[in-house]
Image: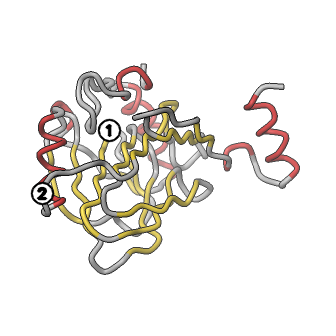
Amino acid sequence: MSHRLSLSILSLVLGLAPTTVALAAPVGAGQPEQLHFADDGVIPNSRLPVLLYRQVPLEGTDRAAALERLFADSAWPPKWRYGVYSYHHYHPNAHEVLGVARGQATLRLGGEQGQDVAVAAGDVVVLPAGTGHRNLESSEDFLVVGAYPPDQQDFITQRADPEAHGRSLELIAQVPVPTTDPVTGRAGALPGLWR
């Protein structure tokens, strides 16, 4: 029995719609966790997996500056330092990387029926274009560094809205796969996992 089929049967037994189940792929040495989210009719999400790197080694005591250097060196220019909005949103025209510099939070990825993911300082989340995300709760010192591929700096922030769904799907289909991984560079996991 395939992994997807057995997971679908489990979701039916538990009374969940198949779109509510996020599949986490096994993690090998140096490989990110992979989370998959289906289109729920409001949040498009992506056929590409969310990549979750835990406790990325960073040099120095200023984690925000270290994340900015890491992303810049990997050809994902850093764009901002802030938190994560408390409402469901996504970027239909850009992939996004979120590097947690301080504190911790629970993020809901994949929309209302998505998955709650705990993140802490040193964790990095790579969101393919269209992936829903929001901050459910966070520590007061929660700080994130956000970055995007060089050709996706003029990103759109789209709130969950069924009327924007069709146009968002068109934009997502036009977003190219980056040639580098924001954490591990040109030889990193992202280009292979997202092809």
Placement of 172 over or under 55, stated as above or below: above
Classify residue 18 by image quadrant: top right
Placement of 59 over or under 143, stated as above or below: above
Classify residue 91 by image quadrant: top left
Question: If you read the primary sequence from the N terminus, does the residue marked by circle 1 or circle 2 appear first?
Answer: 2
Placement of 194 over or under 88, stated as above or below: above
Q: Amino acid at mark 2?
A: Gly
* Residue holding disc 2: 60
How many labels, in total? 2
Q: Is residue 47 left or right of residue 135?
A: right
The x and y percentages for residue 192 are: 40, 20
Between 165 and 82, the residue placed more toward the observer is 82
Between 147 and 121, the residue placed more toward the observer is 121
| Screen quadrant of the N terminus | top right
The x and y percentages for residue 64 are: 16, 59
**What is the crowding at mark 1: few (fewer than 14 residues within 10 Å), some, or many (at least 20)?**
many
* Residue holding disc 1: 95
Residue in the image at 31% along x and 80% along y:
140
Residue in the image at 21% along x and 34% along y:
149
- Mark 2 lies on a secondary structure that is loop
Residue in the image at 25% along x and 26% along y:
180
The x and y percentages for residue 121 are: 31, 62
